[in-house]
Amino acid sequence: MLSRRRTETIGSYVFETPRGRLSNLRYAIAEVESKSGVSFCIHDLRRTFATVADALDIPGYAVKALLNHKNGNDVTAGYIVVDVERLRGPMQKITDFMLKAGGVREGAKVVELGAVSG
């Protein structure tokens, strides 16, 4: 996916727009809002991501790591070593859910159930 993105990019950054590297998301958000008619902020996306992760029963420490949250006063978190491979599975579950919810990827077939005879 990144190789394909590299061939599509304009400059030296993987995620770059004609205005330059994607550091100020204001313009990208404005474009999505104008095309979708839905107003949102970056934290809305983070909340949605965390809510989906929780609904998929992704462990809390994995969600924290995926959100790049510091563990603060959580002593237990200091003992957990999290690496990219550990997070690959949870991230794929979240990605699959989002793509299916957005209609980008086909989900399970819905079938009508007949009446239960008793």
Image (tube, rainbow, N blue to C red):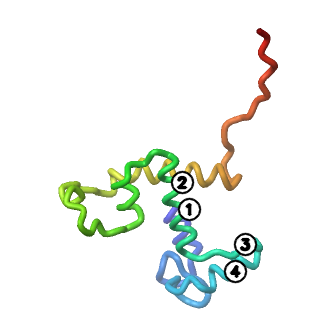
| Mark 1 to mark 4 CA distance (whole Å) | 19 Å
**Label 3 neighbourhood size at 10 Å, few (<14), some (14-19), many (20+)?**
few
Residue 58: give x, y in percent of width and height.
Answer: 43, 48
Residue at x 65%, y 49% (from the top left corner): 100
In this rendering, would 91 be left or right of 45? left
**Label 4 neighbourhood size at 10 Å, few (<14), some (14-19), many (20+)?**
few
Compared to 109, does 31 lie above or below?
Answer: below
The residue identified by callout 4 is 31
Which of 39 and 96 lies nearest the eye of the viewer?
A: 39
Residue at x 36%, y 68% (from the top left corner): 69
Q: Specify which label sits upstream in the sequence, 3 or 4.
A: 4
| Mark 4 to mark 2 CA distance (whole Å) | 24 Å
Q: Are marks 2 and 1 in contact (CB under 8 Å)?
A: yes
| Mark 2 to mark 3 CA distance (whole Å) | 19 Å
Residue at x 75%, y 71% (from the top left corner): 36
Q: Secondary structure at mark 2?
A: helix
**On-image quarter of the C terminus:** top right
Q: Specify which label sits upstream in the sequence, 4 or 2.
A: 4
Residue kind at label 3, given as amino acid type: Val
Residue kind at label 2, given as amino acid type: Val
The residue identified by callout 1 is 48
Q: Specify which label sits upstream in the sequence, 2 or 3.
A: 3
| Mark 2 to mark 1 CA distance (whole Å) | 6 Å
The residue identified by callout 2 is 52
Q: Secondary structure at mark 3?
A: loop
Residue 4: give x, y in percent of width and height.
Answer: 55, 65
The residue identified by callout 3 is 38
